[in-house]
């Protein structure tokens, strides 16, 4: 039996998951350095006194000569659910705890130059749901992991101004797991299985897509002292375009347990299992195949001002802009016979406001805190299990603790607040309008997260 529509549909939806994984702020990670996290990311104008400034403002020179190492991990726990409008049934998300590393090394000699290297994760995380979730036909699991490697050079222009930047090498890997619905598959007799009585959300296969790609970009930063008590900073991170030319799509049979009655339209004997009828498809249209697309990790701009006029205290306010609108469409090119197509996403550019405070004690101990707010990138018609994105608020606390002279331990805690958002668990047609897609919204998503980050600073 040939299931052309099933293979075409599942591969299209598989690739539809990729931009959601790359786009949307839940997959855009700012958890890079515990000091920066505890100051709610407001660190472009007055970066933390550690090597993570390579990311937060590549134009900043270290305050003291010599080598500086900064490395650690952010532990991210995400909680979410979906409640249906009709039955009020709640389905819990099943997102694993994420461990996101960061490593930076900086060196400043006696001159006006500083050199550094950063390895960090600006895009990542996972959206994952349990087996009974009806939205698993859009996405059971969507995972993105992208690592940036950034060599950096900073130069002191004057006593108060410096500039810097460098190339970025990015490596990205994606994974999507998705259920395939039998009810929408066209039978050899003409009607779909759903028209013959098979209920919607009958899973007969599970698709898995995996791929990886590399890309290059650039980052630049500028830092300056406007007065003895006011500082400013500006950073730009370019867009990186990842071309997944050889992603692998595989399909696993899932037992339906359904039995055909006598006089069925397939002309097979009564009590024939539907699963037996479908088995041949996994060596034809549902056989392993290749697929390709391009995913653009959007450009970022962040700028801000900081005040240092209070003794031992820095207060900073930053504005950040991310160009998610580059995900307005996604071209999908199949290499297994399915027709190519263009998928509509219609993401929006986003803005966020970040405020942070640091209080330094005479014994080297530091207390930090901050607040931030970020707008959602996905429009109302694109809130799905792939990424139930919504506006968010952030509250942070942290501390810097001196350890054995040359070492310092930074710790940070962040809670992510969200008020929830309506969305859909059924996929939109490629020809539907935004209003038609919006009409598919059938429930309410909620989301919150807790983040603990630890980093070690060492100066030599």
Image: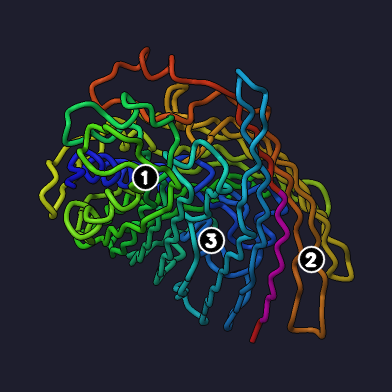
Mark 3 and mark 2 residues within 8 Å of each other at the beta carbon? no
- Mark number, residue 271: 1
Residue of label 2: 400
Which element is circle 3 on? loop
User: Which region is colored magenta?
Assistant: 450-458
Give the label, 3 or 2, closer to the camera.
2
Is 386 located above or below residue 413 in the figure?
above
Q: Label 1, label 3: how many angstroms apart (C-alpha)?
A: 85 Å
Mark 1 and mark 2 residues within 8 Å of each other at the beta carbon? no
Tell me if mark 3 has few (under 14), some (14-19) or many (20+) residues whose alpha carbon lies within 10 angstroms of its own: few
Residue of label 3: 159
Q: Main secondary structure of the magenta part?
A: strand
Q: Residue 46: where, in percent of width, then height? A: 62, 52
- In this view, the residue in front, 430 or 328, is 430
**Residue at 24% over, 50% down:** 294
Is 367 located above or below residue 50 in the figure?
above
């Amino acid at each position: 039996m040939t299931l052309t529509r099933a293979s075409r549909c599942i591969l299209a939806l598989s690739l539809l998951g990729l931009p959601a994984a790359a786009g949307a702020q839940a997959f855009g990670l700012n958890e890079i350095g515990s000091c920066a996290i505890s100051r709610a990311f407001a660190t472009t104008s007055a970066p933390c006194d550690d090597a993570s400034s390579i990311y937060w403002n590549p134009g900043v020179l270290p305050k003291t000569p010599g080598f500086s190492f900064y490395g650690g991990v952010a532990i991210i726990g995400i909680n979410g659910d979906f409640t249906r409008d009709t039955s009020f049934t709640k389905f819990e998300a099943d997102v694993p705890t994420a461990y996101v590393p960061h490593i930076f090394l900086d060196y400043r000699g006696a001159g006006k130059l500083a050199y550094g290297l950063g390895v960090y994760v600006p895009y990542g995380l996972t959206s994952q749901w349990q087996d009974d979730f009806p939205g698993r036909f859009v996405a059971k699991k969507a995972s993105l992991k992208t690592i940036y490697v950034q060599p950096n050079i900073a130069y002191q222009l004057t006593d108060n101004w410096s500039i810097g930047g460098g190339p970025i090498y990015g490596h990205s890997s994606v994974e999507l797991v998705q259920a395939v619905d039998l009810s929408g598959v066209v039978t050899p007799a003409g009607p779909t299985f759903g028209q013959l009585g098979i209920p919607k959300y009958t899973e007969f296969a599970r698709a898995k897509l995996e791929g990886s790609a590399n890309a290059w970009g650039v980052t630049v930063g500028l830092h300056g002292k406007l007065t003895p008590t006011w500082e400013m900073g500006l950073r730009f991170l370019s867009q990186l375009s990842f071309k997944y030319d050889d992603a692998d799509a595989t399909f696993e049979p899932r037992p339906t347990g359904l039995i055909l009655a006598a006089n069925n339209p397939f002309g097979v004997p009564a009590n024939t299992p539907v699963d037996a009828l479908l088995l041949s498809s996994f060596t034809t249209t549902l056989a392993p195949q290749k697929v390709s697309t391009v995913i653009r990790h959007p450009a970022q701009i962040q700028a801000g001002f900081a005040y240092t006029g209070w003794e031992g205290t820095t207060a900073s306010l930053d504005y950040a802009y991310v160009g998610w609108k580059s995900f307005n469409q996604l071209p999908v090119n199949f290499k297994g016979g399915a027709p190519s197509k263009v998928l509509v996403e219609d993401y929006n550019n986003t803005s966020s406001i970040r405020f942070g405070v640091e209080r330094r004690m005479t014994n080297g101990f530091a207390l930090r805190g901050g607040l931030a707010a970020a707008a959602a990138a996905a429009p109302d018609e694109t809130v799905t299990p792939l990424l139930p994105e919504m506006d968010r608020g952030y509250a942070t606390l942290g501390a810097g603790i001196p350890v054995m002279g040359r070492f310092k331990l930074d710790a940070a805690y962040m809670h992510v607040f969200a008020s929830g958002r309506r969305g859909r668990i059924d996929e939109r047609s490629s020809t539907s309008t935004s209003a038609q897609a919006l009409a598919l919204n059938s429930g309410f998503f909620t989301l919150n997260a807790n983040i603990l980050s630890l980093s070690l600073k060492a100066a030599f």
